[in-house]
Every structure is written in C-alpha cells, then in structure tokens.
Image (cartoon, rainbow, N blue to C red):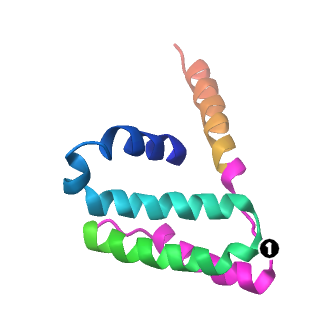
C-alpha cells in the first residue's frame, strides 16, 4: 500500500501545483516510505538511518496531525534501538498481510452460519 501511494504522489501530486500546498504532507509520507523501505531490507545496519527517519517523521506528523497520534506511532520510536541492541530486524509485515485473509474466512463462515 505504501509503495502504491508513493507512486501516486510521484506521478500525480509532485508534477502539479498541489505539491506546494501539500509539501509538508508529502515530506511526512516520504519519511514513512523510507521507514518502510529500511525495515524491509532486514539489515541491522539500518538502525541509525531508521532512527533518524522515525524522529523526523514523528515530529512532522505531530505538527501536521496533532490529534492523530496513536500508540503505534510511539512504539515505532523504539524499533531502531531494538535493532541496535539485538542486531536483528524482526517484522510482522507478512503476518499483517495474512490477517486480512483470516478475517475474510471468519466473516464468510459467520455469514453462512447465520443465514435464516
């Protein structure tokens, strides 16, 4: 999803006048894309770059969307230090993607079992 939105921003938003209006929002999303890309490399060497990207993203995000902070936003601030300490990158991306399939199966089963 992040890659698709980044492509949309690069192809549709950046070449237009909206790029000026949405500049800080585009920059904030750029940091999110960088964070995602760094984590997906699965290399522990990304810890310092990840820490910088997370800090910059958080500062900008909280400036742009002050009432939208969620615990996940804070949890991400601990990932870089965890990677430094453990020297390994652990992700849940594949599990998160599979969650949708399980949810669909459960919804279908529920719908079939409650038909009258």
Front residue of this view, candidates 97 and 83: 83
Q: Is residue 40 magenta?
A: no
**Magenta residues (range):** 67-95
Q: Is residue 107 left or right of residue 45?
A: left
Q: Position of residue 39 (x, y in %)?
A: 66, 63
> What residue do we see at 32% from left, 47% from top?
14
Q: Is residue 20 left or right of residue 75?
A: left
Does the image show residue 69?
yes
In which image quadrant can residue 87 be found? bottom right
Q: Is residue 70 left or right of residue 82?
A: left
Give the answer, above or below, for where 3 lies relative to 33: above
- Name the residue beneath numbered marker 1: 88
Does the image show residue 66?
no
Q: Residue furthest top?
A: 116
Front residue of this view, candidates 58 and 66: 58
Front residue of this view, candidates 31 and 94: 31
In which image quadrant can residue 30 be found? bottom left
Determine whether the residue tagged by mark 1 lies in a helix, strand or loop: loop
Crowding around mark 1 (Cα neighbors within 10 Å: few <14, some 14 to 19, many 20+) is some
Q: Position of residue 84 (x, y in %)?
A: 73, 84
Q: Residue furthest front?
A: 15
Number of callouts in the render?
1
Q: Residue furthest right?
A: 87
Front residue of this view, candidates 100 and 26: 26
In which image quadrant can residue 59 be found? bottom left
> What residue do we see at 55% from left, 72% from top?
76
Q: Position of residue 48 (x, y in %)?
A: 63, 81
Give the answer, above or below, for where 35 lies relative to 2: below
Q: Position of residue 72 (x, y in %)?
A: 50, 68
> What residue do we see at 60% from left, 19% from top?
112
> What residue do we see at 48% from left, 61% from top?
32
């Amino acid at each position: 999803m992040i890659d698709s939105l980044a492509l949309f921003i690069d192809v549709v938003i950046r070449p237009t006048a909206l790029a000026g209006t949405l500049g800080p929002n585009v920059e904030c999303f750029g940091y999110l894309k960088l964070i995602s890309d760094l984590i997906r490399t699965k290399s522990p060497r990304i810890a310092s770059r990840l820490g910088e990207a997370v800090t910059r993203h958080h500062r900008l995000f909280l400036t742009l969307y002050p009432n939208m902070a969620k615990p996940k936003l804070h949890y991400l601030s601990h990932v870089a230090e965890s990677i430094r300490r453990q020297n390994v990158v652990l992700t849940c991306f594949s599990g998160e993607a599979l969650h949708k399939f399980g949810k669909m199966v459960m919804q279908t089963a529920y719908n079939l079992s409650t038909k009258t």
